[in-house]
Amino acid sequence: MTNTTSYLSISVVLSAYFVVSLLVFFPHSTTALHEAEKKEESGNIPVPVNHGTLVKKDQRRSLVTAESGEISAVKVSDGRDGFYHLQFITMEPNSLFLPVHLHSDMVFYVDSGSGTLSWIDVEKDDDKLKQVELHTGDVYRLPTGSFFYLQSSLESDRRKLRINAIFSDSKDEIREGSTYGAYASVRDLVLGFDNKVLQAALGVDEEVIRELRSGENQPMIVHGVTKKEQRLSVHYRIMRAFVGRMKNEIVIDVNKKSKNKAYNILDAKRDVENCNGWSLVVTSKQLDALKDSDFGVYMVNLTKGAMMGPHWNPMTAEIAVALRGRGMVRVVCPSTIDETECKNSRFRVEEGDVFVVPRYHPMAQISFNNESFVFVGFTTTQKNNHPQYLVGSASVFQALDKEVLATSLGVSNRTMDEILSAQREAIIVECTSCAEDEERLMEEEIQREEEEEAKRKEEEERKKEEEEIRKREEEEEAKREQEEKRKKEEEEAKERKEEAAREQEEEEARKREEEAAKQREEEARRRQQEEEAARQEEEEARRRQREEAGRRRQEEQEEEARRRQEEEDAARQEEEEAARRWQEEEESARKRKEQREEEARRQQEEEASRQQEEEARRQEEEEARRQEEEAARQRREQEEEEAARRREEADRQQQEADRQQQEEEAARRQQRQGEGRRRGGGGRGGQGGEGEAARREEEEMARRQREADAASRGRRGGGSLEE
């Protein structure tokens, strides 16, 4: 425990001491990212993951923006194994990328410009400062835990140093990315300690510590300094102090050439090359720095109208960056078991875009007819990948049994023979207008998806409206039922009040009758007292009559009450039966309405499907007709050109023959005239005969000339008739 504490104390003292040295010798270089940039790199605000196979250039997340350069980043997912972290570093000429401590393996490709990479490799327990000159096309790798910085060259053409880099934690965690960002600046590592710890470690007063903390924040990329040797010496000291192996002397001469060399893709021998383009893969066999890394690098250069033949990788995913030109990428799902998880896709890639192709997914990269397509990428393993090609002399079709392959594809052996014998080129093949066709299909798919989305939204709106209508109907139905229930309750209350009033009237009538009876009894008793003996029998008879009448009235009242109760029960049952029948009729009507709506929707879908099929068939017929008309037009033009050429050739030959004939006739005529003049004295009659002969010869020549002209016009007329 004591040894460990002592070691940590010594490390802190050394680290803090050389930070102060760095501030003294080169105060403007010990700068860090400003607050937002520090959060980006420390992982507090992580770069968002793009879940998809394509990330456009304008979707990159900016990490650093300064006068001397900028850094942007993306995290892309292959949909299977996680995400990949890429950074794009751009440095102006004569600028400096300040020292950082790597938290991940870093493999990079130099896209343009030149410069110097300086680093200390902690992984190999080596405290020597290493340097390598970087040029366009170079590939290199730095292991986890390294300290490094970059210096761009001051080139005559002022080209920027552009670097495309990919990061990973280790061989075992290649897809996860570091929790703490790809790297951390030196300033962040130092100023994380409390003032008291730094003061004790450095042995200085508080004023020095306050000055140390008051250093102005700088962007990660700054303008370079003029004293190269001093700059490298200070950077070397600070990086060695942090790895805990600082000595009193500088171990290497920084001006001496290092034996480390990058691998240049542009100067290397290509793995595949023909008139359609070339490709190259870089592994640890070509570059020793990749020996302990699972990353490999590849580059593909397609000429105009060319294609990297359909293929897939059995061992690795591919993460690529488009460097020059445009192209189309077609990615095929290796299985259709779950189409929600995996779908075929095609997308257009432009300069600066990043695209990912997962393991096992067949792919093809295609260039357009008017420009080439160049991209560089990273593979996630250096194992024997052996990409599998579907076409060409290297196709897996060539190794499979022909009959088995024909059965699998559902074609005849003859068709399979034609397919296999037609494949001469391998890997990179000519594919004129293929990218244009893929782009057209992509745009059609996008338009179709937009139309389907619009239909889906329209259907949802329709269902929503129907649901609202149904809810309103249900609410109105509930209100109607409540109103009917309220009316029924009011009627029942009214009936109960009327019944109570009737009962009260009957009770009052009974009481009046009883009062009258009492009066009659008193009167009778009085008369009975007067005529007791005479009326005793009559009073007894009246009493019996009154009792009989009262019994009959009571029986009649009970009968009347029972009858009213039965009528009320019957009326209530009828009302309940009527309400039940009404509910059943309403339910039946609602079901019939839903059936009609479902039938109408199904008919609409069938009609839409039929219209789409008819439209597709009409388009195919229109395309076939157009192609036939184009072919016929071309044949007519060729026939017309051939006929015109033959007519011109015949006219030329006829004119040449006529000219020769005229020249011969003129020569003979001159010869005869000369002979006539030599004979001289033949007499007047002789001269008249020779003149007549000459005149006939001239008429004969004129007649032949007219016949030749008529024949020529006839041939021209015939040609016109043919046309």
Image (spheres, rainbow, N blue to C red):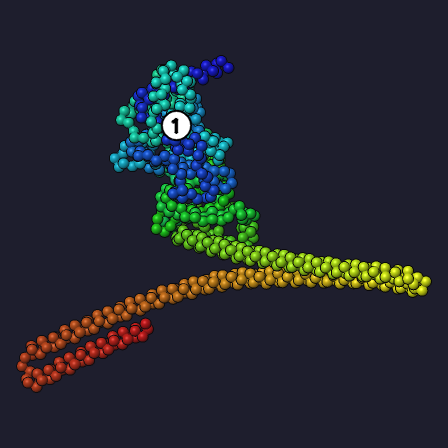
Image spot of residue 390 (x, y percent): 48, 47
User: Dot 1: what SS?
Assistant: strand
295 relative position to 560: left or right: left
Identity of the residue drawn at 44% across and 35% down: 46
507 relative position to 103: left or right: right
Residue under circle 1? 185
Identity of the residue drawn at 27% across and 24% down: 227
| In the image, residue 178 above or below residue 718 | above
Point out the residue furthest to the right here: 533
- Looking at the picture, tell me which residue is in the foreground, 606 or 381: 606
Image spot of residue 136 (x, y percent): 33, 36
Point out the residue furthest to the top here: 2
Point out the residue furthest to the bottom here: 685
- Looking at the picture, tell me which residue is in the foreground, 142 or 609: 609
| In the image, residue 646 above or below residue 698 | above
Is residue 501 among what the camera can see?
yes
Is residue 401 among what the camera can see?
no
| Crowd class of label 1 (few under 14; some 14 to 19; many from 20; radius 10 Å) | many
Q: Quadrant of residue 635?
A: bottom left
Image spot of residue 409 (x, y percent): 54, 53
Identity of the residue drawn at 46% across and 64% down: 618
The amino acid type of the residue labelled 1 equals Ser
- Looking at the picture, tell me which residue is in the foreground, 387 or 360: 360
Point out the residue furthest to the front here: 530
Identity of the residue drawn at 38% across and 21% down: 240
Image spot of residue 191 (x, y percent): 40, 23
70 relative position to 538: left or right: left
Q: Quadrant of the C terminus?
A: bottom left
